[in-house]
Amino acid sequence: MRPMRTERLILRNWEERDRELFHRINSDERVMEFFPFRRNRAAADAKMDEFRARIDEDGHGFAAAEIAATGECIGFVGITGTEDVDSLPAGAIEIGWRLAPEFWGKGYVTEAAEAWLAYGFETLGLDEIVSFAVAENHRSIAVMRRLGMRADPGAGFDHPAVPDSHPHLKRHVLYRLSRLDWQARKRAAR
């Protein structure tokens, strides 16, 4: 992918120097509160390699988010396919994120996500981008709402990758943003 620049961030593919941060955000109890697993270093390295290969192949994915002023990687934000979620229509594209806790509450996710929405709607010509989270994940849901996404109450689903041993993490809410709604929101902001 070609790196994207926002006011404070660079969104880019993963580099070897990002491995420690990637492992940290995938094993941190606060970051992974709504996930049924924590990744050890080997599993985190394998997932980062998977993310990097997908970005190389598709030109987008869950990309590293770096503070432009310092070069520090803070986590990831991006758009990717949802092939592993049978409840969603074939070809659905989701937007998602994960940051180290010390970077929460600074607007980084919203800033990066706005850039990814523009890329998805303007460059890729997508008609819709979705996002989903555990129903109790109020922080992520707040970001979805800030992005102008709307809940689709009839489309909530039990995530197929969440084992029955974690029933409190199974139910997910789905938010949607159409290109038309995104364009109207952009016009209204001018």
Image (cartoon, rainbow, N blue to C red):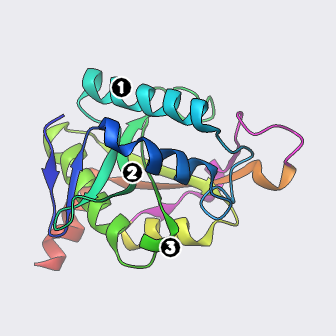
Q: Kindly report the distance in space between the C-alpha atoms of the residues bearing marks 3 and 1.
A: 28 Å
**Residue 142 got which mark?**
3
- Tell me if mark 2 has few (under 14), some (14-19) or many (20+) residues whose alpha carbon lies within 10 angstroms of its own: many
Magenta span: 149-166
CB atoms at circles 2 and 1 under 8 Å apart? no
Q: Residue at x 26, y 39 (%)?
A: 126
Q: Which residue is mark 2?
A: 76
Q: Quadrant of residue 188?
A: bottom left
Q: Nearer the viewer, mark 2 or mark 3?
A: 2
Q: Is residue 91 visible?
A: no
Q: Is residue 133 left or right of residue 3?
A: right
Q: Looking at this rendering, what residue extends furthest in the right direction?
A: 165
Q: Which residue is mark 1?
A: 54
Q: Residue flagged by tag 1: what amino acid is it? A: Arg
Q: Kindly report the distance in space between the C-alpha atoms of the residues bearing marks 2 and 1.
A: 14 Å
Q: Residue flagged by tag 3: what amino acid is it? A: Ala
Which mark sits nearer the N-terminus, 2 or 3?
Answer: 2
